[in-house]
Amino acid sequence: MKNDALRLFFALGCPLELAEAISTWRSSLHLHGRPVAAANLHLTLAFLGQQPRARVAELQGLAGGLRAKAFELHLDRLGRHRNGLLYLAPSHTPEALLELVERLCSNLSSAAIQLDNRPFRAHLSLLRHCPMQAIDADPCFDWPVTRFSLFASEQSTRGTHYRQLHTWPLLRNDLGASGTT
Ligand code: ATP
Ligand code: MG
């Protein structure tokens, strides 16, 4: 990676406690493949790819001006992509998540940042190179999503690491009585 460029993406970083619960559950399935580290579990909202470092301040301004609602995400579906990526997904994608992605992508387009036009599919990558195998699992993880973040994806000898550059709160009105933290 060039020094003046960062590999950037907006995502929902999985809260530590939930990431540990998912990781423990995943271990209990004794699957083959390369697990995504618990600290790296996330749900990508928009992938920007290589961007000049100098652009981060502009991206922060652009995301900071975005108003979107907090929501509950129920990860209750296990899927496997043709390329062997095993993922967790919601069987129903909340409207508020779709709105967040739509507003983010629209702001990015206005700033002339190119995104690929594949449709958004909410998923949390669990394991790479997962062979075809019957998996007896009935996942059910509830994630109160209250923030979104900008990450830089970095490579080192220890593998891929996502560095959180900035995080923004989502509006909490709709989370109900339990959404007070
Ligand atoms: P690695 O590539 O090192 O195995 P990774 O795929 O998680 O790990 P990145 O390639 O930096 O790391 O990607 C960061 C995030 O952006 C991941 O969630 C990845 O799925 C997503 N992503 C990467 N490339 C694209 C793309 N072209 N379009 C949409 N999302 C992408
Ligand atoms: Mg990748």
Image (spheres, rainbow, N blue to C red):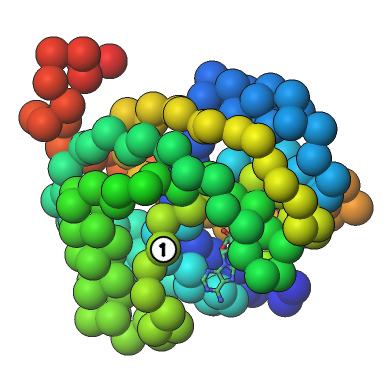
Q: Residue at x 39, y 45 (%)?
A: 90
Q: Which residue is mark 1?
A: 121
Disc 1 crowd rating (10 Å Cα; few below 14, some 14-19, many 20+) is few
Look at label 1 and name its amino acid.
Arg
Left or right of 91 in this view: 37: right
Q: Quadrant of the C terminus?
A: top left
Left or right of 181 in this view: 40: right
Of residue 171 and residue 175, the one placed in the foreground of this image is 175
Taking the image as drawn, is residue 56 in sight?
no
Quadrant where ligand 2 appears: bottom right
Using the image, determine if residue 181 lies above or below residue 135: above
Disc 1 CB within 8 Å of nearest ligand 1 atom: no
Q: Residue at x 9, y 30 (%)?
A: 173
Residue 97 position in % (x across, y down): 26, 51
**Quarter of the image where one finds residue 31:** top right
**Quarter of the image where one finds residue 126:** top right
Of residue 71 and residue 64, the one placed in the foreground of this image is 71
Residue 79 position in % (x across, y down): 56, 53
**Quarter of the image where one finds residue 63:** bottom left
Residue 125 position in % (x across, y down): 60, 51
Residue 17 position in % (x across, y down): 54, 20
Left or right of 164 in this view: 155: right
Of residue 70 and residue 114, the one placed in the foreground of this image is 70
Q: Which residue reaches farthest left?
A: 173
Q: Quadrant of the N terminus?
A: bottom right
Left or right of 59 in this view: 40: right
Disc 1 secondary structure class:
loop
Q: Which residue reaches farthest right?
A: 157
Taking the image as drawn, is residue 143 in sight?
yes
Q: Residue at x 19, y 58 (%)?
A: 99
Q: Residue at x 76, y 43 (%)?
A: 35
Number of numbered markers: 1
